[in-house]
């Protein structure tokens, strides 16, 4: 581990709040509005950290602990993902299994915090989140396994640096399916349209937002920061497993990586501006389609 391997992911984590802001700016531009500043989330986080957390009378230590564990688990998963031209600070064989595991821990901690409030609405959102995770987690694990099989490597950092342009010429169909599945998983795991609407305030239709209705002050800041980290994590995975970095210079890698993150954020904003939220009964079918794409990719790579 060197200083650069720590500096790169630190810079990404610090810049993570810009990605949700880019999504909002794209949505505002499509609607003919100006939209918030790219630094609005930083201002919101600073304001939330200064406020007092108001806890429900039915909440226990599980509520606070669950929020903290979810943020720390998301942070740990982000530190296992390489950033463009640098290996991850925590890189070792089969580390992508731990990435999926830590994201699962963050989800369980969030569910526990939501259930601890005793709110029927938050329990409803938690049950929906648990159901949808049955489709997203296997799909993510299988997608990462496909890239490991294709590259012959067992670490995310080694997988990224070993992807060459000729892989697309020989396995274009499988890689296109994987990229499509990863984008669908990015939308689902980050509670974006068409799976969820982060801007809605209707409890009967919310999933993630309804689970954090009782969060306030520093606890809500932790949730918002973890959400930004998670979006940056999935965007990084999508960009780095789609773009072949092996033959690029470090400077070009950095520029390509940053551009790729912005392109992903713009794509999310366009999707949210042009699509409506799916009916809840349709969400599992859509996620099952993403899982099917990863299975088909696995079969194509096996041939």
Image: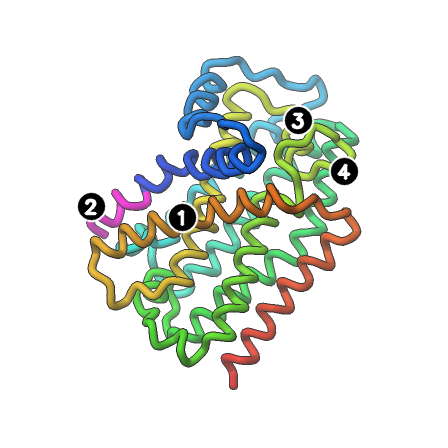
Determine crowd level at label 4: few under 14, some 14-19, many 20+ residues with C-alpha closer than 10 A.
some
User: Which element is circle 2 on?
Assistant: helix
Part of the protein shown in magenta: 1-9
Distance between the alpha carbons at the discs numbered 4 and 2: 45 Å
Q: In the rendered image, which residue does mark 2 sit on? A: 3
Distance between the alpha carbons at the discs numbered 2 and 3: 39 Å
Q: In the rendered image, which residue does mark 3 sit on? A: 213
Residue 130 magenta-highlighted: no
- Sequence-earlier tag: 1 or 3: 3
Distance between the alpha carbons at the discs numbered 1 and 3: 29 Å
Determine crowd level at label 3: few under 14, some 14-19, many 20+ residues with C-alpha closer than 10 A.
some
The image shows residue 5 at horizontal and vertical percentages of: 25, 49
- Sequence-earlier tag: 2 or 3: 2
- Is residue 77 in sight in this rendering? no
Q: Are marks 1 and 4 in contact (CB under 8 Å)?
A: no
The image shows residue 167 at horizontal and vertical percentages of: 38, 75
Q: In the rendered image, which residue does mark 4 sit on? A: 124
- Sequence-earlier tag: 4 or 2: 2
The residue mark sitting in front, 1 or 3, is 1
> Looking at the rendering, which quadrant does residue 211 occupy?
top right
Q: In the rendered image, which residue does mark 1 sit on? A: 261
- Is residue 150 in sight in this rendering? yes
Q: State whether residue 244 is above or below residue 111.
A: below
User: Which element is circle 4 on?
Assistant: helix
For the point 42% across and 63% down, which residue is it? 242
Determine crowd level at label 1: few under 14, some 14-19, many 20+ residues with C-alpha closer than 10 A.
many
């Amino acid at each position: 581990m060197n200083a650069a391997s720590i500096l790169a992911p630190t810079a990404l984590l610090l810049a993570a709040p810009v990605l949700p802001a880019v999504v909002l700016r794209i949505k505002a531009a499509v609607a003919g509005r100006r939209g918030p500043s790219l630094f609005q989330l930083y201002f919101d986080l600073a304001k939330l950290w200064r406020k007092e957390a108001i806890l429900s009378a039915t909440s226990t230590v599980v509520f606070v602990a669950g929020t903290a564990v979810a943020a720390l688990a998301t942070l740990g998963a982000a530190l296992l993902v390489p950033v463009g031209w640098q290996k991850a600070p925590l890189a070792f064989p089969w580390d992508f299994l731990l990435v999926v595991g830590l994201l699962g821990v963050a989800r369980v901690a969030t569910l526990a915090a939501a259930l601890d409030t005793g709110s029927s609405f938050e329990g409803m959102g938690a049950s929906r989140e648990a159901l949808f995770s049955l489709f997203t987690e296997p799909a993510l694990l299988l997608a990462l396994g496909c890239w490991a099989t294709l590259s012959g490597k067992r670490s995310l950092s080694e997988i990224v640096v070993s992807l060459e342009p000729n892989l697309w010429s020989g396995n274009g169909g499988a890689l296109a399916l994987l990229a499509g599945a990863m984008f669908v998983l990015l939308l689902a795991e980050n509670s974006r349209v068409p799976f969820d609407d982060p801007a809605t305030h209707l409890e009967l239709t919310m999933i993630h937002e309804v689970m954090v209705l009782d969060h306030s002050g520093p606890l809500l800041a932790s949730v918002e920061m973890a959400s930004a980290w998670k979006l940056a994590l999935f965007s990084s995975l999508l960009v780095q497993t789609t773009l072949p970095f092996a033959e690029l210079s470090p400077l070009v890698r950095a520029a390509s990586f940053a551009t790729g993150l912005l392109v992903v954020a713009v794509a999310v904003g366009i999707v949210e501006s042009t699509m409506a939220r799916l009916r809840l009964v349709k969400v599992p079918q859509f996620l099952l389609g993403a899982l099917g794409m990863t299975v088909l990719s696995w079969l194509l790579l096996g041939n």
